Amino acid sequence: MEAIELKELVNFISTKLVFKCEDWDKILIKNDYVYRFGLELIGTGSELNAGSVLVMGNSEKYFIDTLLPSEKLEIFENLFSRRFSVLFLADSIKPDSLIPKFASKYKIPVFSVKNEAASFIALITNFLEEKLEPTITRPAGFLSIHGEGILLTGESGIGKSEVALELIHRGHKFISDDLTEIQKNSLNSLIGFSPSNISKFIEVRGIGIINVQQLFGVNAIKKFETIDMIVNFEIWDEDRVYDRIGSVEKYANILGIDIPFVSIPVKPGKNLAVIVEVAAMNNRLKKQGMDSYYDLMGRISSEEIESRTKTRELVFTWN
């Protein structure tokens, strides 16, 4: 979502309206970063603009109270002229007499909240991130396996849900089946979670819909996880030559972030749940700088090592 109306943020918190401008409830919030007066007070901030939220706390109030009237005028003019969307006064502080004047001039609503400034900023930052960060929904199951968030993809009917059940039975955490919502957060990572209407449910052909929480207990469920890897199931092709040593580093690009991708050929006799577990653990080791491929190549002469460098291959893009 590119923007939310200010009234949605106000309804989320407990506030008291200090200054109301015309159509304040239709003002848009476009920035999930919450600004505190700090450097903005002395005119050195550069990012504060329309669509932004500004918070003032006790420390800023103390600073303002030490200024001369002319200094206050200059600071408030510089600050409010940036036409940010809303000002929240934390700690229930009493606003300086100039704040309503400049709020009226630039049509910026002002609210008072009881929360301490730092905790209030943390509260609304989480809310705005959830509302404003890009979110997509894609056909994939999602589990947390040894702390790694693993998306399961593949053609319908190939056995993703059955593998998910086996992994849950082995003690791993279930997040979603068939559809996963993916959100990019401010830390430039991806978070996966289930659409609310299908949360906790898995469809198993031959059995029907099952409630994972009722069947396996509350500890089998997790609400969300960082997406660390995609494991794709594909039908075994006898004529295809598969990469057996991991010389090709495949990845998918989701919302601008590269995610490791492995494809597992499916045929009778394979224990797919164990393979997915190993893929998750191996991915965790790679993030820690341990790669079995290069360990093996290290036993080969240096001339050959240069020719054994991994190649990268983009498999697909989700935007």
Image: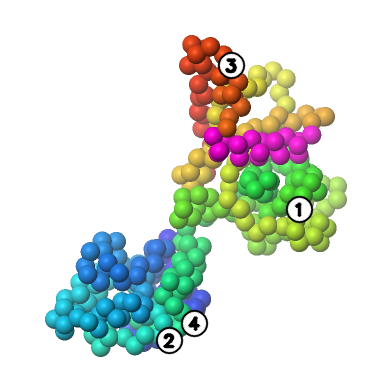
Does the segment drawn in magenta span residue 38?
A: no
Q: Amino acid at mark 2?
A: Lys
Q: Which residue is mark 2?
A: 16
In space, the residues marked 2 and 4 are separated at their CA atoms by: 7 Å
Q: Horizontal and vertical percent for residue 32?
A: 42, 63
In space, the residues marked 1 and 3 are separated at their CA atoms by: 46 Å
**Circles 1 and 4 in contact, beta carbons < 8 Å:** no
Q: Horizontal and vertical percent for residue 122?
A: 47, 68
Q: Residue at x 51, y 62 (%)?
A: 130
Q: Which residue is mark 1?
A: 202
Q: Which residue is mark 3?
A: 299
For the stretch drawn in magenta, what is the main secondary structure? helix
Q: Residue at x 49, y 82 (%)?
A: 14
How crowded pointer 3 is (Cα within 10 Å; few <14, some 14-19, many 20+) is rated as few
Q: Horizontal and vertical percent for residue 201?
A: 75, 57
Indicate which label's residue lies in the foreground, 3 or 2.
3
**Foreground residue, 197 or 229?**
229
Sequence order check, earlier mark of 1 and 3 = 1
Indicate which label's residue lies in the foreground, 4 or 3.
3
Q: Which mark is residue 14?
A: 4
Q: Is residue 313 above or below residue 69?
A: above
Taking the image as drawn, is residue 275 in sight? yes
Mark 1 lies on a secondary structure that is strand
> In the picture, residue 229 is in which quadrant?
top right
In space, the residues marked 1 and 4 are separated at their CA atoms by: 38 Å
In space, the residues marked 2 and 1 are separated at their CA atoms by: 45 Å
Q: Which residues are magenta?
A: 271-289
Indicate which label's residue lies in the foreground, 1 or 3.
3
**Foreground residue, 164 or 45?**
45
**Foreground residue, 207 or 297?**
297
Q: Amino acid at mark 3?
A: Arg
